[in-house]
Amino acid sequence: IVMTQSPATLYVSPGERATLSCRASQSVRSRLAWYQQKPGLAPRLLIYAASTRATGIPARFSGSGSETEFTLTISSLQAEDFAVYYCQQYNNWYTFGQGTKLEIK
Amino acid sequence: QVQLVQSGAEVKKPGASVKISCKASGYTFTDYGITWLRQAPTHGPEWMGWISTSNGNTNFAQKVQGRVTMTRDTSTSTVYMELRSLTSDDSAIYYCASSHVEADVFDFWGQGTLVTVSS
């Protein structure tokens, strides 16, 4: 299953909303996770089962979607949110998208 | 607290092998399997395989099948991943990870091990 994320780079101002997209080449039901990765660090789990926040993840992060179309929304961007975000399907083995880099506008 | 601590960076020549360790702590080792992933520069992570820490069963990605071995030592709560016949395409950061909150999502990660394959 190929995971395609868009856009590749997203420029957003602090305090604004960011919307990141992930599309699967075939249905993954709701078996979709989102990760955040900062330079030099391992990915951090944000969302699993398409919309469930992982432990300790702030409420400004939310996930939605099912089957082939998914969205990660960050409601009010904080300075620490600027990073690369990956989606991962786990319905048929495991594949990750190529990432969306969230940059300060 | 759950921790996965990996061995240090490696530089290898093409055709060589590399063996990376991942030591787990903060939980019962045999309760959760360990997954290995790797990440090349500017790419998303790539799943390589999984080992059951309770019985040693393994599953590998087709891409590395035949070149990879995963083993575990329950006495030291350590998992090992060996990759053979290295090429420059194997240059990447290698991560071990475990799935506690839900099977198949990776909520705990090691710090990563950089493997560079160069002549």
Image (cartoon, rainbow, N blue to C red):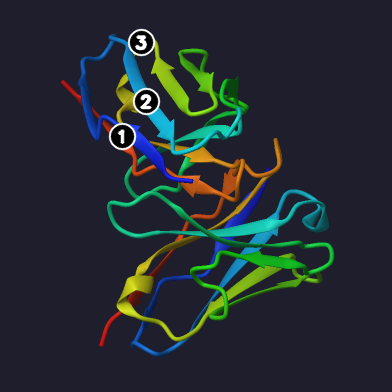
Q: Height in image: B21 above or below B41?
A: below
Q: Find numbered disc 1 in the image and state the secondary structure of the residue it sits on.
A: strand
Amino acid type indicated by mark 3: Ser
- Residue closer to the observer: B31 or A67: A67
Q: Find numbered disc 2 in the image and state the secondary structure of the residue it sits on.
A: strand
Camera-near label (2 vs 1) is 2
Q: CA distance from mark 3 to mark 2?
A: 17 Å
Q: Height in image: B44 above or below B89?
A: above
The residue pinned by badge 1 equals: A100
Q: Are marks 3 and 2 in contact (CB under 8 Å)?
A: no
Q: Are marks 2 and 1 in contact (CB under 8 Å)?
A: yes
- Of the numbered discs 2 and 1, the one sitting upstream in the chain is 2
The residue pinned by badge 3 equals: A76
Instruction: Indicate the chain on which mark 3 is placed.
Output: A
Image quarter of the N terminus of chain B: top right
Q: Residue at x 28, y 9 (%)?
A: A16
Image quarter of the C terminus of chain B: bottom left
Are discs 1 and 3 located on one and the same chain?
Answer: yes
Amino acid type indicated by mark 2: Ser
CA neighbours of label 1 inside 10 A, class few (<14), some (14 to 19), many (20+):
many
